[in-house]
Image (cartoon, grey):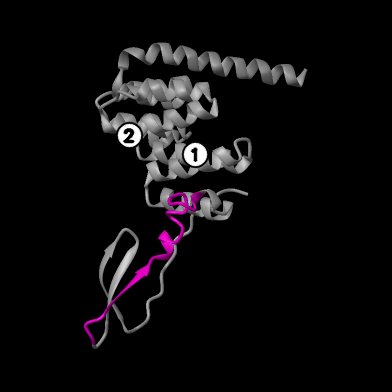
């Protein structure tokens, strides 16, 4: 099973008029009177399950819910604290790994490269750690987002971001790395005409190799 993050709506009695919301608590005025009532939003129902004197006794289900709620609210440091508690209980459980992966992905989405790197290092993914460290100091937002999109395998989205950055040639480099010579040729004509001949040669070599492979299969 994978982690689930679902939107929740909190029903309010018709006589309750919300006047203030803070940290998952809605302060309501009771219609026709001066009394106030406080109601906890369902989106925050277990958000603090990992805190307090009874945290060690919290059910696994409550901790999983607390993780999902904190993650959904982008409280990444709190989500990390929950994941650490779950990890201490079940370090080798698949659910624990799912939590860490979900946290890493969300951190990357939010461009918190330091947190994503720390989580991937804990997971032992040396390749991803190196990839994240290479982009950690990029200060151009579009360029950084483009590299993150590449790590998610979103090549088209990454190209658009690279084209808006101060280093649009990154889009061309991506297509060359992916051996997508037709797309690379179109970008080269636009961004680096001097690279068109070399890309044409590589494209021709790819087509020739494909022809030889096809002929070998027929034989």
Percent coordinates x, y for residue 70 in the rendering: 42, 50
219 within the magenta span: no
Few, some or many C-alpha atoms within 10 Å of disc 2 (few <14, some 14-19, many ≥20)? many
Would residue 40 appear left or right of 153 to someone viewing this image? left
Q: Spatial distance from mark 2 to mark 1, Cα to Cα? A: 34 Å
The C terminus lies in which quarter of the figure? top right
Few, some or many C-alpha atoms within 10 Å of disc 1 (few <14, some 14-19, many ≥20)? some
Q: Residue furthest left?
A: 34
Would residue 217 appear left or right of 32 to someone viewing this image? right
Q: Earlier in the sequence, mark 2 or mark 1?
A: 1
Residue at (37% x, 81% y) in the render: 13
Q: Which residue is mark 2?
A: 161
Residue 54 to residue 141: above or below: below
The picture quadrant where one finds residue 124 is top right
Q: Residue furthest front?
A: 53
Tag 1's secondary structure?
Answer: helix
Q: Which residue is mark 1?
A: 84
Please state the extent of the stretch shown in magenta in the rendering.
33-55
């Amino acid at each position: 099973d994978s982690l689930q993050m679902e939107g929740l709506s909190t029903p309010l009695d018709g006589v309750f008029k919300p006047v203030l919301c803070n940290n998952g608590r809605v302060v309501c005025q009771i219609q026709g009177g001066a009394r106030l009532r406080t109601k906890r939003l369902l989106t925050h129902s277990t958000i603090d399950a990992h805190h307090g004197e009874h945290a060690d006794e919290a059910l696994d289900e409550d901790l999983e819910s607390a993780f999902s709620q904190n993650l959904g609210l982008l409280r990444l440091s709190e989500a990390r604290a929950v994941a650490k508690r779950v990890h201490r209980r079940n370090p080798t459980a698949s659910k624990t790994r799912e939590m860490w992966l979900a946290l890493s992905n969300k951190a990357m989405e939010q461009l918190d490269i330091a947190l994503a790197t720390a989580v991937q290092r804990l997971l032992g993914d040396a390749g991803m750690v190196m990839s994240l460290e290479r982009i950690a100091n990029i200060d151009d937002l579009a360029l950084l987002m483009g590299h993150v999109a590449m790590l998610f395998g979103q090549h088209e989205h990454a190209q658009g971001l690279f084209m808006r950055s101060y280093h649009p040639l990154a889009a061309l480099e991506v297509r060359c790395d992916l051996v997508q010579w037709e797309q690379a040729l179109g970008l080269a004509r636009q961004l680096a005409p001097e690279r068109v001949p070399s890309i044409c040669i590589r494209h021709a070599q790819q087509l020739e190799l494909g022809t030889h492979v096809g002929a070998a299969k027929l034989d």
